[in-house]
Image (cartoon, helix red, strand yellow):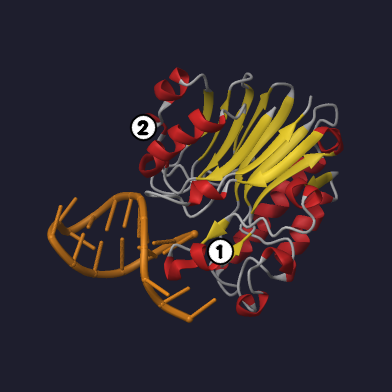
Amino acid sequence: MKVATWNVNSLNARWPRVEGWLLQHAPDVLLIQETKMTDAKFPYDALATLGYEAAHYGQGQWNGVAIFSKVGLLNVTMGFGDDDPEARIVGAQCGGVQFYSCYVPNGRSLDDPHYLYKLAWLEKLRTMLATRDAAMPVLVGGDFNVTPSDFDCYDPSVMVGATHVSEPERAALVAIEATGLVDLTRVLNPDLPCYSWWDYRNGSFHRGWGLRIDLLYVDEYLRERATASYVDRDARKGEKPSDHAPVVADFSL
DNA sequence: ATGTCACAGTCCCTGTGA
């Protein structure tokens, strides 16, 4: 089973790239973030032509998450079941695995209310994962907007005082791991940066100024069966790329 | 460090978010 997560920064603007990527890589499951579209505009028919069922939790202009699957799509859940109006998490069971596609709030700055919303959102995710059905393998992927460690930053010295590197954000990831999950890309590539995002500005991609903020958390069952995890940097090149590259994992199930 | 992109509305430019 091939699985990937990709923040596409508008599925409307990115559809030609997404369609091409699906044809080239044929993942069994693709977790998408930032569709930035209403459900009415979601390309269900085009995905069906490519062999994918899809679950979309859309909001409109901002946010929006989806799961594309070639291996079935059951028990779709949207949000955490509270009154949060932002469309940032969708879940589904695909091929006997519980998947979640997550778009963690950015936080904006450490003194912004949105930063507290980010921490609260991560705690809601942790609570949900702590009470999950342990009988079902689980993969939680998405744009976490947090670097797990300084090694996931091109230059930690320029990130001091910023979001994405703060101790509370990293502690929130550690607490999520404590529910029985591992950061698969890092576990399989302890010595590679595996950056997944580069700012559109400053020629950041070509200068190597990246961050690893798109993560795949898996339980022990999936970790034991994982054969590879990598970033498809080619998807960050060329015409109208997203500012994120897909993060892929292969499993022998 | 700020050299970009996408969105909606004020609608062919501007403010906002990332």
* Quarter of the figure with the C terminus of chain A: top right
Q: Is residue A27 above or below residue A6?
A: above
Residue placed under numbered mark 2 in the picture: A41
Task: From the top left corner, tell me how far across and down residue A90 is, in percent.
Answer: 59, 36
Amino acid of disc 1: His
Secondary element under disc 2, as helix, strand or loop, is: helix
Amino acid of disc 2: Lys
Image mark count:
2
Identity of the residue drawn at 67% across and 60% down: A119
The reply to whether residue A37 is in sight is no
Residue placed under numbered mark 1 in the picture: A114
Task: From the top left corner, tell me how far across and down residue A67 is, in percent.
Answer: 57, 32
Q: Is residue A237 left or right of residue A209?
A: left
Q: Which mark is residue A213?
A: none
The reply to whether residue A76 is in sight is yes
- Mark nearer the N terminus (2 vs 1): 2
- Categorize mark 1 by other alpha carbons within 10 Å: few (<14), some (14-19), many (20+): some
Identity of the residue drawn at 64% across and 58% down: A212
